[in-house]
Image (cartoon, grey):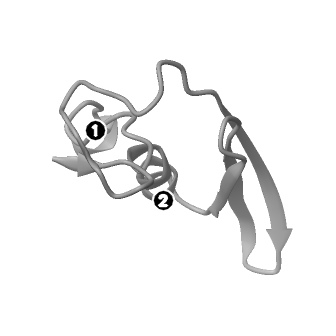
Amino acid sequence: MSTNTTGEPVPKNSFSHPMSTFVIRIWREWSTEGAIWRGNIEHLESKKRSGFQDFERMLAFLHSFGVLNEGEYQNDEEN
């Protein structure tokens, strides 16, 4: 069972707020090694935000709000 932002257990198929709004920004930066994709995700209700360079870190942020619990999404690259 996952936990919400206060550490309380969140039952599967539940969420911490009746509506959660996230803003996700993704951009590409160039370096001598080539292109690097970066992103930022913000939970509008709590004003919490996190930067990420990979999909798993973005999902971890969503999980921290009880959204998209593990097993509720499928990575097509693994199939």
What is the CA distance from the residue labelled 1 to the residue labelled 2? 13 Å
**Residue 41 image position (x, y, % from top left):** 66, 47
Q: Secondary structure at mark 1?
A: loop
Image quadrant where residue 43 sits: top right
Per the rendering, the mark at residue 28 is none
Q: Earlier in the sequence, mark 1 or mark 2?
A: 2
Pointer 2 residue: 57
Residue in view at x 35 percent, y 34 percent: 68
**Residue 49 image position (x, y, % from top left):** 68, 54
Pointer 1 residue: 69
**Residue 67 image position (x, y, % from top left):** 40, 34
Residue in view at x 31 percent, y 39 percent: 75
Left or right: 29 in relation to 13: right
Q: Amino acid at mark 1?
A: Asn
Decide: few, some or many residues near mark 1? Use Cα within 10 Å; few <14, some 14-19, many ≥20.
many
Between 23 and 64, the one lying in front of the other is 64
Left or right: 19 in relation to 49: left
Asked if the residues shown at circle 1 and circle 2 are in contact, with their CB atoms under 8 angstroms apart, the answer is: no
> Farthest top residue?
18
Residue in view at x 29 percent, y 51 percent: 8
**Residue 10 image position (x, y, % from top left):** 25, 40
The relative height of residue 3 versus residue 53 in the rendered view (above or below) is above
Residue in view at x 44 percent, y 43 percent: 65
Q: Quadrant of the C terminus?
A: top left
